[in-house]
Amino acid sequence: MRELKSNFASEIIEYDCFRQSMGYADTHFRYLSFFDAFCFDNYPDATSLSKDMIKGWFADVKSKRPGTLRDSYFAINGFLRFVGAIECVLPSSYLQRKPAAKRPYLLSDEELVAFFHALNNAKWQDPFSGRTLGTMIRLIYSSGIRPNEARDLKTTDVDLIKGTIHIRNSKKNKERIITLAEDMQNLMIHYAQERDLFVHNSELFFSHSNGSAVTQAFLWRTVDRCWKKANPTTQTLPQINPYTFRHQFASTIIMKWLNEGVDILTMIPYLKAHMGHSHFESTVYYIHLLPERLLSAKGVDWEALDAIGKDVSLWENS
């Protein structure tokens, strides 16, 4: 945990403890630690919050860390409401309107083969990173877990004898157990054996050879690099990212059920629990991504489901 230095440190810590007691992750603390540093540098003697202070920090975020603007907005406003500084709460006009989420791209079988071939043959500065990323991305694709859930897996969360993984660091702190497909279980057994030889002093199941974690940025760059390598002659490629393989998993499962004439209304709750979705609509949304040729499948009542999930952002609810 980052050390806080401003006169508001104790209140920030109290707010973080309150959020965690309510079942939330400590995500707001990270952004408020930047606020603490800003106050320490610019308002070292301040003991009360002011509008100028909040506006100045938010302008600093906008110029230095624009990618964190939305998260910073919600973090600071939550903190201000917690301490009773309602007059300092930033209005919604400070929050840039988020662009509409793009429709997730689903890969064809040929595109999947080409991608994983490129992944298998990629060059790495750390040779063991190839084994780590190759196994991690296949786990996301075969189980549908979130990319950050794969990155955060600890060795103690993986039971390779039973073939299960325990997802602890999930959205809204909802834990769940995932059963691995047999081929994925075998792949992870082989990876674990190599990991024991090459990696030391790391509690993470997936790591580089020096034991360091696979960052989100590195994972996203890897997917983008291999996707482009798999399609060297295509000038305009659809955008994919690690979440693409999670979407691919859910869509593939639903397509299988549709082709088999399974009652989707009966099975969707199971898929919802497996995916770790908080809302039923987030799972149903995948049905609307399926190819036109499956619209006539007998396993789904389209009139009953047509109005569900259309406005759900898969990027926010994934």
Image: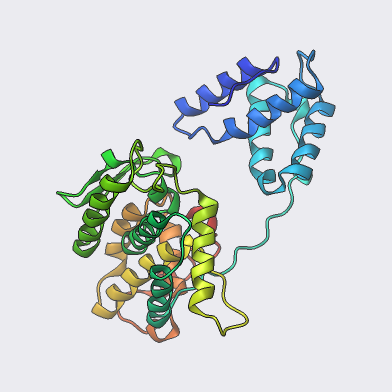
Taking depth in this image into account, of 37 and 195 the one nearest to the observer is 195
Q: Position of residue 287 (x, y in %)?
A: 41, 71
Taking depth in this image into account, of 247 and 92 the one nearest to the observer is 247
Q: Is residue 307 left or right of residue 170?
A: right
Q: Residue furthest left?
A: 161
Question: Would residue 312 be seen by someone viewing this image from the given angle?
Answer: no
Q: Residue furthest right?
A: 52
Instruction: Name the residue: 50% across, 48% down.
Output: 215
Taking depth in this image into account, of 116 and 246 the one nearest to the observer is 116
Instruction: Name the residue: 31% across, 54% down.
Output: 274
Question: Would residue 282 be seen by someone viewing this image from the given angle?
Answer: yes
Q: Position of residue 186 (x, y in %)?
A: 20, 59
Instruction: Name the residue: 68% across, 21% down.
Output: 84
In this rendering, the answer to whether 248 lies above or below 94 is: below
In this rendering, the answer to whether 24 lies above or below 255 is: above
Instruction: Name the residue: 78% across, 16% down.
Output: 44
Q: Position of residue 50 (x, y in %)?
A: 81, 23
Q: Position of residue 222 (x, y in %)?
A: 50, 62
* Colouring mode (rainbow / by chain / secondary structure / one colour): rainbow
Location of residue 97 by image quarter: bottom right
Q: Is residue 8 left or right of residue 149?
A: right
Location of residue 154 by image quarter: top left
